[in-house]
Image (spheres, grey):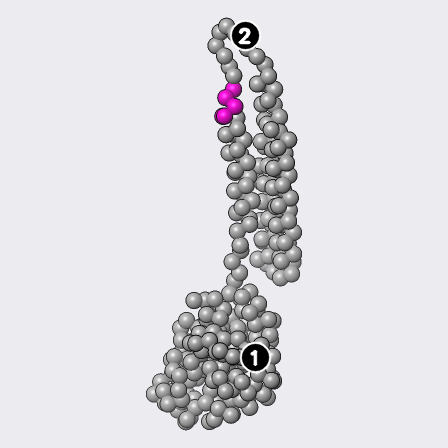
Amino acid sequence: MADHSKDDIFQLIKKFGAFLTLKFNNLFHNLDSRSIGAIAGLAVAILFTWRLLRSPSEPQRRQPKRETTAPSSSGPTNHSNPNQISSGVSSQDSGAQNVIDEFFQPVKPTLGQIVKQRLSEGRKVTCRLLGVILEESTPEELQKQATVRSSVLEVLLEITKYCDLYLMERVLDDESEKKVLAALEDAGIFTSGGLIKDKVLFCSTETGRTSFVRQLEPDWHIDTNPEIIHQLSRFIRYQLQIASVKPERSAGNILSSPSLEEFFGCV
Protein backbone atom coordinates (compact mmCIF):
# COMPACT_ATOMS: atom_id res chain seq x y z
CA MET A 1 0.00 0.00 0.00
CA ALA A 2 2.94 2.34 0.71
CA ASP A 3 4.30 1.98 -2.84
CA HIS A 4 0.87 2.63 -4.28
CA SER A 5 0.46 5.77 -2.15
CA LYS A 6 3.92 7.02 -3.13
CA ASP A 7 3.02 6.60 -6.79
CA ASP A 8 -0.20 8.57 -6.27
CA ILE A 9 1.68 11.38 -4.50
CA PHE A 10 4.30 11.42 -7.26
CA GLN A 11 1.58 11.79 -9.86
CA LEU A 12 -0.04 14.63 -7.88
CA ILE A 13 3.30 16.44 -7.61
CA LYS A 14 3.95 15.92 -11.31
CA LYS A 15 0.51 17.25 -12.18
CA PHE A 16 0.95 20.23 -9.89
CA GLY A 17 4.39 20.95 -11.36
CA ALA A 18 2.97 21.09 -14.88
CA PHE A 19 0.30 23.48 -13.66
CA LEU A 20 2.87 25.75 -12.01
CA THR A 21 4.99 25.81 -15.17
CA LEU A 22 2.00 26.99 -17.19
CA LYS A 23 1.03 29.63 -14.64
CA PHE A 24 4.58 30.99 -14.29
CA ASN A 25 4.86 31.31 -18.07
CA ASN A 26 1.61 33.31 -18.17
CA LEU A 27 2.57 35.46 -15.19
CA PHE A 28 6.01 36.41 -16.54
CA HIS A 29 4.49 37.16 -19.94
CA ASN A 30 2.29 39.89 -18.43
CA LEU A 31 4.29 40.77 -15.31
CA ASP A 32 2.84 43.55 -13.17
CA SER A 33 2.20 44.21 -9.47
CA ARG A 34 -0.72 41.78 -9.39
CA SER A 35 1.38 39.10 -11.07
CA ILE A 36 4.13 39.52 -8.47
CA GLY A 37 1.55 39.06 -5.72
CA ALA A 38 0.27 35.96 -7.49
CA ILE A 39 3.81 34.53 -7.66
CA ALA A 40 4.25 35.06 -3.93
CA GLY A 41 0.94 33.35 -3.28
CA LEU A 42 1.95 30.39 -5.43
CA ALA A 43 5.24 30.07 -3.54
CA VAL A 44 3.39 29.83 -0.24
CA ALA A 45 0.98 27.34 -1.79
CA ILE A 46 3.89 25.15 -2.96
CA LEU A 47 5.29 24.92 0.58
CA PHE A 48 1.88 24.20 2.07
CA THR A 49 1.03 21.55 -0.51
CA TRP A 50 4.43 19.85 -0.19
CA ARG A 51 4.03 19.57 3.57
CA LEU A 52 0.50 18.26 3.12
CA LEU A 53 1.66 15.64 0.62
CA ARG A 54 4.51 14.50 2.85
CA SER A 55 2.53 14.22 6.08
CA PRO A 56 0.70 10.93 5.35
CA SER A 57 3.80 9.17 3.98
CA GLU A 58 5.41 8.26 7.35
CA PRO A 59 2.32 6.73 9.04
CA GLN A 60 1.62 4.72 5.91
CA ARG A 61 5.00 2.98 6.18
CA ARG A 62 4.65 2.21 9.90
CA GLN A 63 1.05 1.03 9.99
CA PRO A 64 1.58 -2.33 8.20
CA LYS A 65 4.28 -3.26 10.82
CA ARG A 66 1.82 -2.97 13.67
CA GLU A 67 -0.57 -5.34 11.92
CA THR A 68 2.09 -8.13 11.70
CA THR A 69 2.35 -8.44 15.51
CA ALA A 70 -0.03 -11.25 16.41
CA PRO A 71 -1.46 -11.04 19.95
CA SER A 72 -1.94 -14.12 22.15
CA SER A 73 -5.16 -16.04 21.77
CA SER A 74 -6.18 -15.12 25.28
CA GLY A 75 -7.09 -11.62 26.46
CA PRO A 76 -8.45 -8.64 24.58
CA THR A 77 -7.12 -7.96 21.08
CA ASN A 78 -5.65 -4.60 19.99
CA HIS A 79 -5.81 -5.14 16.20
CA SER A 80 -6.08 -1.90 14.21
CA ASN A 81 -9.05 -1.83 11.92
CA PRO A 82 -7.76 -1.98 8.29
CA ASN A 83 -10.84 -0.12 7.12
CA GLN A 84 -10.06 2.75 9.50
CA ILE A 85 -6.45 2.93 8.28
CA SER A 86 -7.56 2.91 4.65
CA SER A 87 -10.14 5.60 5.40
CA GLY A 88 -7.57 7.82 7.09
CA VAL A 89 -5.11 7.58 4.19
CA SER A 90 -7.87 8.14 1.68
CA SER A 91 -9.03 11.23 3.57
CA GLN A 92 -5.51 12.69 3.61
CA ASP A 93 -4.99 12.00 -0.08
CA SER A 94 -8.37 13.55 -0.80
CA GLY A 95 -7.36 16.68 1.09
CA ALA A 96 -4.16 16.98 -0.96
CA GLN A 97 -6.11 16.46 -4.17
CA ASN A 98 -8.60 19.16 -3.18
CA VAL A 99 -5.77 21.64 -2.62
CA ILE A 100 -4.36 20.94 -6.07
CA ASP A 101 -7.79 21.00 -7.71
CA GLU A 102 -8.33 24.51 -6.34
CA PHE A 103 -5.22 25.67 -8.18
CA PHE A 104 -6.45 24.03 -11.36
CA GLN A 105 -9.64 26.10 -11.34
CA PRO A 106 -9.50 28.50 -14.30
CA VAL A 107 -8.46 32.02 -13.30
CA LYS A 108 -10.97 34.54 -14.57
CA PRO A 109 -9.15 37.20 -16.60
CA THR A 110 -9.77 40.88 -15.96
CA LEU A 111 -11.76 42.97 -18.43
CA GLY A 112 -8.56 44.76 -19.41
CA GLN A 113 -6.89 41.45 -20.28
CA ILE A 114 -9.93 40.39 -22.30
CA VAL A 115 -9.92 43.69 -24.21
CA LYS A 116 -6.23 43.32 -25.11
CA GLN A 117 -6.70 39.70 -26.15
CA ARG A 118 -9.85 40.23 -28.21
CA LEU A 119 -8.37 43.24 -30.00
CA SER A 120 -5.23 41.22 -30.80
CA GLU A 121 -3.02 43.92 -29.30
CA GLY A 122 -4.44 46.49 -31.75
CA ARG A 123 -3.36 50.00 -30.84
CA LYS A 124 -5.81 52.16 -32.80
CA VAL A 125 -9.60 51.72 -32.92
CA THR A 126 -12.30 53.69 -34.73
CA CYS A 127 -15.95 53.26 -33.77
CA ARG A 128 -19.26 54.77 -34.83
CA LEU A 129 -21.58 56.10 -32.14
CA LEU A 130 -25.12 55.30 -33.23
CA GLY A 131 -26.23 51.81 -32.26
CA VAL A 132 -22.91 51.05 -30.58
CA ILE A 133 -22.16 53.68 -27.94
CA LEU A 134 -25.47 55.54 -28.08
CA GLU A 135 -29.00 54.22 -27.55
CA GLU A 136 -30.16 56.12 -30.63
CA SER A 137 -29.79 54.48 -34.04
CA THR A 138 -30.49 57.28 -36.57
CA PRO A 139 -29.24 60.85 -37.08
CA GLU A 140 -32.84 62.06 -36.83
CA GLU A 141 -33.05 60.78 -33.26
CA LEU A 142 -29.92 62.75 -32.36
CA GLN A 143 -31.75 65.97 -33.18
CA LYS A 144 -33.94 65.26 -30.13
CA GLN A 145 -31.53 63.61 -27.70
CA ALA A 146 -28.34 61.59 -27.26
CA THR A 147 -28.11 58.84 -24.65
CA VAL A 148 -24.98 56.84 -23.83
CA ARG A 149 -25.66 53.14 -23.24
CA SER A 150 -24.71 52.46 -19.62
CA SER A 151 -23.81 48.81 -20.35
CA VAL A 152 -21.05 49.82 -22.76
CA LEU A 153 -19.28 52.32 -20.51
CA GLU A 154 -16.95 49.91 -18.71
CA VAL A 155 -15.76 48.33 -21.96
CA LEU A 156 -15.33 51.71 -23.62
CA LEU A 157 -13.17 53.03 -20.80
CA GLU A 158 -11.00 49.89 -20.88
CA ILE A 159 -10.47 50.32 -24.62
CA THR A 160 -9.27 53.89 -24.06
CA LYS A 161 -6.64 52.58 -21.61
CA TYR A 162 -4.97 50.37 -24.22
CA CYS A 163 -5.92 51.90 -27.55
CA ASP A 164 -6.01 55.19 -29.38
CA LEU A 165 -9.79 55.45 -29.77
CA TYR A 166 -11.70 57.66 -32.21
CA LEU A 167 -15.49 57.96 -32.16
CA MET A 168 -17.37 59.19 -35.23
CA GLU A 169 -20.90 59.76 -36.48
CA ARG A 170 -23.03 61.30 -39.19
CA VAL A 171 -25.17 64.17 -37.90
CA LEU A 172 -27.69 66.50 -39.51
CA ASP A 173 -26.88 69.73 -37.65
CA ASP A 174 -24.59 71.40 -35.13
CA GLU A 175 -27.09 70.91 -32.32
CA SER A 176 -26.82 67.17 -32.72
CA GLU A 177 -23.05 67.41 -32.28
CA LYS A 178 -23.50 69.36 -29.06
CA LYS A 179 -25.98 66.81 -27.73
CA VAL A 180 -23.60 63.94 -28.44
CA LEU A 181 -20.59 65.63 -26.82
CA ALA A 182 -22.68 66.60 -23.78
CA ALA A 183 -23.93 63.03 -23.39
CA LEU A 184 -20.39 61.62 -23.60
CA GLU A 185 -19.13 64.18 -21.08
CA ASP A 186 -21.98 63.49 -18.64
CA ALA A 187 -21.19 59.77 -18.85
CA GLY A 188 -17.61 60.48 -17.74
CA ILE A 189 -15.94 59.27 -20.91
CA PHE A 190 -13.64 62.28 -21.14
CA THR A 191 -12.56 62.19 -17.49
CA SER A 192 -10.49 58.99 -17.79
CA GLY A 193 -7.86 60.78 -19.87
CA GLY A 194 -7.93 58.21 -22.67
CA LEU A 195 -10.40 60.05 -24.88
CA ILE A 196 -10.64 63.77 -25.65
CA LYS A 197 -13.32 65.73 -27.50
CA ASP A 198 -11.02 66.25 -30.48
CA LYS A 199 -11.21 62.51 -31.13
CA VAL A 200 -14.98 62.61 -31.57
CA LEU A 201 -15.50 63.25 -35.27
CA PHE A 202 -18.66 64.31 -37.10
CA CYS A 203 -19.59 64.23 -40.77
CA SER A 204 -22.69 64.81 -42.87
CA THR A 205 -22.60 61.61 -44.98
CA GLU A 206 -21.82 57.90 -44.57
CA THR A 207 -19.07 58.33 -47.15
CA GLY A 208 -17.52 60.90 -44.83
CA ARG A 209 -17.26 58.29 -42.07
CA THR A 210 -15.60 55.89 -44.49
CA SER A 211 -13.07 58.59 -45.37
CA PHE A 212 -12.32 59.20 -41.69
CA VAL A 213 -11.52 55.53 -41.20
CA ARG A 214 -9.35 55.33 -44.31
CA GLN A 215 -7.33 58.36 -43.21
CA LEU A 216 -6.84 57.16 -39.63
CA GLU A 217 -5.84 53.61 -40.71
CA PRO A 218 -6.92 51.86 -37.50
CA ASP A 219 -6.22 48.27 -36.53
CA TRP A 220 -9.95 47.87 -35.80
CA HIS A 221 -13.10 49.58 -37.01
CA ILE A 222 -16.47 49.02 -35.31
CA ASP A 223 -19.65 49.82 -37.21
CA THR A 224 -23.26 48.83 -37.76
CA ASN A 225 -23.48 49.63 -41.46
CA PRO A 226 -22.79 46.48 -43.53
CA GLU A 227 -21.98 48.53 -46.62
CA ILE A 228 -19.23 50.46 -44.86
CA ILE A 229 -17.91 47.24 -43.31
CA HIS A 230 -17.75 45.67 -46.78
CA GLN A 231 -16.05 48.70 -48.36
CA LEU A 232 -13.38 48.84 -45.67
CA SER A 233 -12.66 45.11 -45.54
CA ARG A 234 -9.80 45.48 -48.03
CA PHE A 235 -8.12 48.27 -46.12
CA ILE A 236 -8.66 47.63 -42.39
CA ARG A 237 -6.99 44.74 -40.62
CA TYR A 238 -9.99 43.83 -38.43
CA GLN A 239 -13.60 44.95 -38.30
CA LEU A 240 -16.42 44.31 -35.85
CA GLN A 241 -19.95 44.54 -37.20
CA ILE A 242 -22.57 45.19 -34.53
CA ALA A 243 -25.71 43.40 -35.70
CA SER A 244 -28.58 41.62 -33.97
CA VAL A 245 -28.39 38.85 -36.57
CA LYS A 246 -25.06 37.35 -37.60
CA PRO A 247 -24.29 38.13 -41.26
CA GLU A 248 -24.48 35.07 -43.51
CA ARG A 249 -21.36 35.96 -45.45
CA SER A 250 -18.38 38.06 -44.44
CA ALA A 251 -14.67 38.32 -45.06
CA GLY A 252 -12.24 36.52 -42.79
CA ASN A 253 -11.23 39.77 -41.09
CA ILE A 254 -14.82 40.71 -40.17
CA LEU A 255 -16.31 39.60 -36.86
CA SER A 256 -19.83 40.22 -35.62
CA SER A 257 -21.58 40.62 -32.28
CA PRO A 258 -25.01 41.82 -31.08
CA SER A 259 -23.28 44.54 -29.04
CA LEU A 260 -19.83 45.84 -28.16
CA GLU A 261 -20.10 44.64 -24.57
CA GLU A 262 -21.14 41.15 -25.64
CA PHE A 263 -18.08 40.92 -27.88
CA PHE A 264 -15.94 41.29 -24.75
CA GLY A 265 -18.06 38.91 -22.71
CA CYS A 266 -19.60 41.52 -20.42
CA VAL A 267 -23.18 40.28 -20.88
Q: Amino acid at mark 2?
A: Ser
Which percent across, then down, holds residue 7? 63, 36
Above or below residue 162? Residue 203 is below
Which percent across, then down, holds residue 29? 65, 61
The answer to whether residue 191 shows anywhere in this view is no
Which of 93 and 103 lies nearest the eye of the viewer?
93
Above or below residue 162? Residue 101 is above
Residue plotted at (54% across, 85% down): 230
Residue plotted at (47% across, 93% down): 205
Task: Determine the image quadrant of residue 254.
Answer: bottom right
Q: Amino acid at mark 1?
A: Ala
Residue plotted at (49% across, 81% down): 223
The answer to whether residue 247 shows anywhere in this view is yes
Nearest-to-viewer mark from 2 and 1: 1
User: What crowding class fits label 2: few (fewer than 14 Cα within 10 Å), some (14-19), or many (20 or more)?
Assistant: few
Which of 93 and 30 lies nearest the eye of the viewer?
93
Which percent across, then down, holds residue 204? 46, 94
Q: Residue furthest toward the front?
A: 248
Q: Which residue is mark 1?
A: 251
The answer to whether 239 appears left or right of 170 in the picture is right
Residue segment shown in magenta: 80-84
* Label 1 element class: loop
Which of 29 and 244 lies nearest the eye of the viewer?
244
Task: Please tell me whether residue 196 belongs to the stretch shown in magenta.
Answer: no
Is tag 2's residue or tag 1's residue first in the polypeptide sequence? Answer: 2
Task: Please tell me whether residue 81 belongs to the stretch shown in magenta.
Answer: yes
User: What crowding class fits label 1: few (fewer than 14 Cα within 10 Å), some (14-19), or many (20 or more)?
Assistant: few
What mark, if any, has residue 72 been given in the picture? 2
Which percent across, then down, holds residue 37? 58, 53
Above or below residue 111? Residue 80 is above
Task: Determine the image quadrant of residue 232.
Answer: bottom right
